[in-house]
Amino acid sequence: MRQLVAQVAAEIATDASSRAGAPDGYGHGDVTVGSDRARAHVWAKTGDAIHAERKDSPLMQIVGEAGPRGEWWDGSGGRP
């Protein structure tokens, strides 16, 4: 499960970097897996990514598309 959550975080970071026009602009990690939930953090790590978050909010766009439970991610390593 830990590896799966880390993979999703990496995909989100890549997607956000692309939307922000900031190659490698987002970091990811701090994976936590409990008995009933799992989470990982994705954050803007460069000046260009931080600026994009203030202006266009790429991470919030991804969250909005994913829905409250991340329905866009089908578990196969990509979007359906």
Image (cartoon, grey):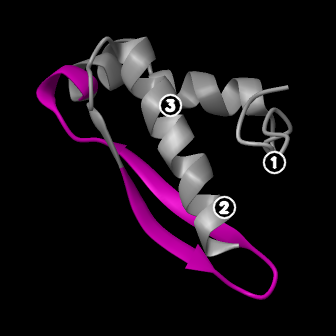
- Check disc 1: other Cα within 10 Å, few if <14, some if 14-19, many if 20+: few
Disc number for residue 75 = 1
Disc number for residue 14 = none
The answer for how far apart the CA atoms under marks 3 and 2 are is: 19 Å
Location of mark 2 (residue): 4
| Left or right: 42 in relation to 25 | right
| As drawn, 39 above or below 56 | below
| As drawn, 59 above or below 10 | above
Q: Is residue 34 part of the magenta span, yes or no?
A: yes
Viewer-proximal residue among 2 and 56? 2
Mark 1 and 2 residues: CB-CB less than 8 Å, in contact?
A: yes
Q: Residue at x 81, y 48 (%)?
A: 75
Q: Specify start and end residues of the magenta stretch as a single range.
A: 28-49
| Left or right: 48 in relation to 77 | left
Which callout, 3 or 1, points to the residue nearer the camera?
1
Badge 2 marks a residue whose secondary structure is: helix
- Check disc 3: other Cα within 10 Å, few if <14, some if 14-19, many if 20+: many
Q: Residue at x 53, y 49 (%)?
A: 9
Q: Position of residue 52 (x, y in %)?
A: 31, 17
Disc number for residue 59 = 3
